[in-house]
């Protein structure tokens, strides 16, 4: 893991020379820390925790701890191996017992051995003692597994001694110990190690998903519920962790460690070695019958060279626009790698593809292609690729719950896009009850289809204004209020939701709850409360005035720009994304006109604002339809005028475009567009 900065480091001196009693003090000061609100504590120790304590490399820290513990081994060995530690305990009993019993380094080593099992290994008493013996042997201390087994006969009493000391200290709530009847000697050590090193890394993605503020960690109940929802989908957590998370002992066994990790999270998503974790996602261009791998941008990684032992090296760079890295060369062919895990590693990052039976994709307007996303977003159009092994289940879900208009993409032998996968396009789910019922009948793929949203109540959608500079993210135009997501666990639950002091009971669901009302919410601050979580958002009648702090000429331009937009809010404002899609306008006579994307005004950058991701097209009174395309694919159609269709003479390009529009699913699902197209077909002619 990444090392602590000097300002965060609480250690002093050379960690490689710390004695047993010095380690006792360091663990007490860094691990057994009283938590806000009197929360329980645990003795979770892994390589990253040792790095944090020592401010040194994990291997140096492990060697120092193991050496300190081995220094207390009795020369007589066997069941007497820990006799020097028992003498420390006897002396402690005769003192005032203000400090914890001198067993912390020994207990820490016993936990460290367990946390080093990887995510695919199960806790096994037959494997534990060889693992512990190997830990000592690695640093030059030979002790047999059989000897450790004999010496561990009193290990449970050492844990109970520590738990009783914590219980009698008013600074702590408790030190939970859960007995494992068949594993008396090592059971307590194993229960402290339910978060393995791999789990710790995966939990950084969970913290990122809930936008965790380490300075304001949610309470144990809220965090546990969110984690259970998040972990319902395959996340790479160890089987032991998931088993405990779903059981009745989760609060006792997991939450002390989880709360401690949350309060110290550095806001990075990492893998087990501490490198930034990047995802390799599937992207499809159905128009060109092409599939490829893409890597979404993480702001922490600007540029890096990544290497695969199998596929060679590749350079990734953040683009000027868009959310996908620019790649120096294509990643390996999708057809050869879609069913296997592969990765590219660099000094600071690792990019990983994890195979799955179902890929849900949404259209990326800036990339001009369909890109893998976290799951179905209600009311949005999706492409779904499904492995042949579960294709029948997905087909039933789509037939039962999807809106009409979907279709199976043809993959002739000469143009196979994904071998072994069926592809569905134009898939939209807008019926909440039908979607929930269909997923219940397809448990094997349900987790892959459900929306992969943050597992805590949050705001989505709405006409949000990009004005973070005036405080907060949640600013919306009047009439464009956001929706509220109440994440659903394995089964729906009732929750009490309060908006501006008026409360009602709602069910958790995969579908968002609209906050739009008639009449709209008044301008100003509004407060949503869901359990202990409070969400604030601002409603504006127009765009708020911004203070740019630049020269008067920039200020004048900015005020003029804001005023113009404020005035225009009385009518509809049509905006289009900058990116790789093409934009067109069709007028009442069927004539086609291309829309050019305007240059970004210089004053926006000079005023310290981010470049806008959208622009407002120039429209004329006779314009009727606004169309976006990617190649020959019709991405979106919006009606922007009310002029009646009039047959007229058209050019050949316009006629071909109208035919392509008529063949698209947008025409099939839009009766008004069908009327226009029928009038043009009946009365128009081509020059």
Image (cartoon, rainbow, N blue to C red):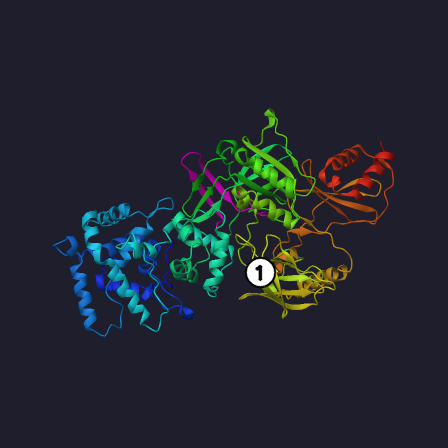
Residue 405 lies left or right of residue 66; in this view the side is right
Q: Position of residue 476 (x, y in %)?
A: 66, 61
Of residues 292 and 532, the one drawn nearer to the viewer in this rendering: 532
Q: Position of residue 628 (x, y in %)?
A: 70, 43
Neighbor class of circle 1 (other Cα within 10 Å; few <14, some 14-19, many 20+) is: few
* Number of marks in the rendered image: 1
Q: Residue furthest front?
A: 181
Of residues 635 and 376, the one drawn nearer to the viewer in this rendering: 376
- Residue 199 seen in this snapshot: yes
Decide: is 362 above or below 481: above
| Residue underneath mark 1 | 494
Q: Position of residue 186 (x, y in %)?
A: 27, 54
Residue 488: quadrant of the picture:
bottom right
Residue 161: quadrant of the picture:
bottom left
Which residues are the magenta region?
Answer: 301-326
Q: Secondary structure at mark 1?
A: strand
* Magenta stretch holds residue 247: no
Residue sitting at x 46%, y 36%:
340
Of residues 365 and 314, the one drawn nearer to the viewer in this rendering: 365
Residue sitting at x 28%, y 48%:
125
Decide: is 578 above or below 40: above
Instruction: Name the image quarter holding the C terminus.
Output: top right
Decide: is 393 above or below 257: above
Of residues 155 and 119, the one drawn nearer to the viewer in this rendering: 155
Residue 26 lies left or right of residue 35; in this view the side is left
Residue 287 lies left or right of residue 419; in this view the side is right
């Amino acid at each position: 893991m990444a090392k602590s900065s000097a300002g965060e480091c609480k250690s002093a001196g050379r960690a490689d020379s710390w004695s047993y009693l010095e380690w006792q003090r360091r663990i007490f000061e860094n691990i057994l820390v009283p938590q806000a609100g009197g929360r329980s504590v645990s003795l979770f120790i892994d390589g990253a925790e040792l790095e944090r304590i020592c401010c040194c490399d994990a291997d140096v820290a492990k060697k120092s701890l193991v050496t300190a513990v081995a220094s207390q081994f009795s020369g007589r060995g066997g069941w007497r191996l820990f006799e020097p530690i028992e003498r420390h305990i006897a002396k402690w009993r005769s003192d005032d017992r203000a400090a914890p019993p001198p067993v912390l380094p020994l207990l820490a080593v016993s936990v460290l051995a367990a946390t080093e099992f990887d995510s695919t290994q199960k806790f096994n008493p037959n494997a534990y003692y060889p693992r512990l013996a190997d830990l000592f042997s690695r640093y030059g201390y030979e002790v047999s597994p059989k000897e450790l087994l004999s010496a561990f006969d009193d290990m449970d009493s050492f844990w109970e001694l520590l738990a009783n000391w914590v219980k009698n200290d008013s600074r702590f709530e408790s030190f939970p110990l859960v007995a494992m009847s068949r594993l008396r000697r090592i059971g307590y050590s194993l229960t402290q190690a339910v978060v393995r090193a791999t789990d710790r890394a995966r939990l950084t993605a969970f913290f990122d998903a809930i936008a965790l503020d380490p300075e304001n960690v949610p309470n144990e109940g809220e965090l546990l519920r969110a984690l259970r929802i998040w972990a319902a989908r395959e996340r790479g957590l160890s089987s032991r962790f998931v088993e405990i998370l779903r059981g009745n002992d989760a609060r006792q066994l997991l939450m002390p460690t989880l709360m401690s990790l949350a309060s110290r999270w550095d806001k990075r998503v990492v893998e087990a070695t501490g490198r930034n974790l990047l995802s390799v996602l599937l992207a499809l261009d159905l128009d060109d019958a092409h599939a490829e791998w893409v890597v979404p941008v993480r702001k922490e990684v600007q540029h890096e060279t990544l290497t695969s032992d199998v596929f060679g090296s590749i350079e990734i760079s953040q683009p000027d626009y868009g959310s996908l890295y620019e790649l120096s060369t294509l990643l390996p062919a999708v057809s050869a790698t879609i069913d296997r895990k592969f990765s590219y590693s660099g000094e600071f990052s690792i990019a990983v593809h994890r195979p799955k039976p179902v890929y849900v994709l949404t259209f990326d307007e800036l990339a001009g292609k369909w890109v893998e996303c976290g799951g179905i977003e209600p009311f949005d159009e999706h492409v779904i690729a499904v492995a042949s092994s579960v294709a029948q289940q997905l087909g039933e879900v789509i037939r039962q719950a999807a809106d009409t208009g979907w279709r199976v993409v043809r993959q002739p032998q000469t143009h196979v896009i994904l071998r072994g996968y069926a592809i569905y396009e134009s898939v939209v789910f807008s019926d909440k009850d039908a979607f929930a019922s269909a997923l219940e009948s397809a448990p094997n793929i349900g987790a892959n289809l459900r929306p992969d949203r943050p597992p805590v109540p949050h705001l989505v959608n709405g006409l949000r204004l990009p004005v973070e500079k005036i405080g907060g993210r949640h600013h919306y135009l009047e009439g464009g209020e956001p929706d509220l997501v109440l994440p659903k666990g394995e089964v729906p639950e009732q929750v009490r939701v309060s908006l501006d002091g008026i409360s009602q009971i709602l069910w958790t669901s995969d579908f968002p709850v609209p906050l739009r009302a008639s009449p709209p919410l008044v301008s100003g601050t509004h407060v949503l409360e869901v359990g202990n979580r409070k969400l604030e958002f601002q409603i504006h009648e127009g765009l708020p005035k911004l203070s740019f702090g630049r020269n008067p000429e920039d200020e004048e331009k900015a005020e003029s720009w804001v005023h113009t937009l404020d005035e225009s809010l009385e009518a509809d404002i049509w905006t289009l994304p900058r990116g790789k899609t093409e934009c067109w306008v069709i007028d009442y006579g069927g004539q086609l006109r291309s829309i050019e994307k305007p240059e970004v005004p210089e004053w926006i950058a000079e005023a310290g604002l981010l470049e806008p991701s959208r622009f407002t097209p120039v429209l004329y009174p006779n314009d009727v339809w606004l169309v976006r395309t990617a190649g020959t694919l019709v991405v979106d159609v919006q009606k922007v005028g009310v002029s009646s269709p009039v047959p007229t003479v058209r050019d050949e390009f316009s006629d071909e475009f109208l035919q392509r529009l008529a063949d698209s699913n947008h025409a099939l699902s839009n009766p008004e567009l069908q009327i226009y197209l029928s009038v043009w077909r009946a009365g128009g002619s081509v020059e």
